[in-house]
Image (tube, grey):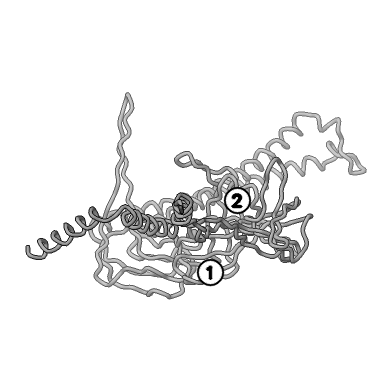
Amino acid sequence: MKIFSSIKKKLTSVKDWFLKSSVLVKIIIVLVIVAIGWFAVSKIIGTKSTKAQYQTTQVTKGTLIVSVTASGQVASTNNTSITTQASGVVSKIYVKDGDTVKAGDKIADIDLDIYGKQKSMSSLASYQSAQNALNSTKSDLYTTQSTMFTKWSTFMDLAQNSTYQNSDGSPNDLNRALPQFHIAQDDWLATEAKYKNQQNVVTQAQTALSSAWYSYQQLSPTIYAPMSGKISGLSLQVGTVIGSSSTSSTTTTTTSSSSTSSTSSTKIANVRTDATPTITVNLTEVDAPTVKTEDQATLTFDAFTGKTFTGKVVSIDTAGSVSSGVTSYPATILLDSNIEEIYPNMSATANIITATKNDVLLVPTAAVQTQNDQTYVRLLKNGKPQQVNVETGLSSSTQIEITSGLSEGDNVITSTVSSTTSTSSTSTSPFSSFGRGVGGGIRRD
């Protein structure tokens, strides 16, 4: 409180002194305050100027690579699953992960439960029935073949006798028009047709037997490899329980209803072949027309940071598909080499090279501008920009070919940056004009 009282007293004394001062003193004090304020404002504001700065690059000669980018996954075309429809407990395992097997090799044995035995016996009965049917069709084939040869022999004896053949060996067309000749000929041709048809019946029975055998294999107590390759993902252990599962469907009509059931398969492991992996990527409707089979591609995978692989386009599905209003066209890329570490369904990104041009003039795409159907670039000469009309060719996402208008080594402007600088302005002191006015107004008598 004493401090505030002291300050108040001093301010009051200053005020009293100012009021008691002469007019000239008051004017001088006011001018000093105005001068200080003017000086501060002029320092803060100053004078601002704007200057353009140009980013440039030289026209170079090199190779232009045009590519499109697409993403997708590794296809599972070189993998298949080992499955079984049997149910029971695993009693023996013949292979392990990484082993190489051949088609038909044993994978594991199962002690079937009661449901597994019932289904296996039923499937075995179907296989035996198919085997009996094949044997029966083969027997009919042999009988038909014997009959065909007999009819053929009868016909040939008739056709070669003197009644139906002239002495010079030429056919007697007049007598061969008789019914007896046609009957013998038709009997032979009919048996020949039956023989050919029976051959088809045997082929069909063989196919049915193979199908029955594969069905029995799925339900048998032994699990077999469906094809040759390397085992992966084997999840079985001795004592593993493989459960029984089935799906059913019912069909109803106005006169009757029927119910059918089918047994689903349990996946045991995978078999991978030596085939080179393929990658399926989706092309946009803009990029699809530019991509052709045999186009080279570079690929990267999320699983392999910093690594790049090569391949080529082997097929393009030009029918395409539409999802959520977006059209895409699947393309298949075959890798140049078989990489075991590349697994099915891995995510991949492909850069497909659609065009390559060597020894051309190149500038960044940012340097080329178009206005009123005229393409141009700006050159920097003696620190000043100069517009030059050009003709362009191929372009990529970063570079564009210049076919005319520029030379190698020209400095083209890629961007312009405006910079603002401040300089102190020359201000006139309020003392000068005021002083001149005051001085001019003093009379000297």
Question: What residue type is disc 2 on?
Answer: Ile
* In the rendered image, the vertical position of residue 289 relative to residue 65, given as above or below: above
Which x, y percent locates residue 197? 60, 43
Q: CA distance from mark 1 to mark 2?
A: 23 Å
Which x, y percent locates residue 406? 77, 58
Query: Circle 2 is placed at which residue position?
Result: 316
Q: Name which of mark 1 and mark 2 comes first in the sequence.
A: 1
Picture residue at 30% right of the left edge, 38% below the top: 259
* In the rendered image, the vertical position of residue 278 relative to residue 156, given as above or below: below
* In the rendered image, the vertical position of residue 33 relative to residue 93, given as above or below: above
Quarter of the image with the N terminus is bottom left
Which x, y percent locates residue 64? 69, 61
Q: Are marks 1 and 2 in contact (CB under 8 Å)?
A: no
Classify residue 328 as left or right of residue 25.
right
Classify residue 398 as left or right of residue 98.
right
Choose top left, top right, bottom left or bottom right for residue 109: bottom left
Farthest residue to the left: give it: 1
Query: Would residue 405 be seen by someone viewing this image from the given angle?
Result: yes
Picture residue at 60% right of the left edge, 64% below the top: 311
Query: Circle 1 is placed at which residue position?
Result: 274
Question: What residue type is disc 1 on?
Answer: Asp
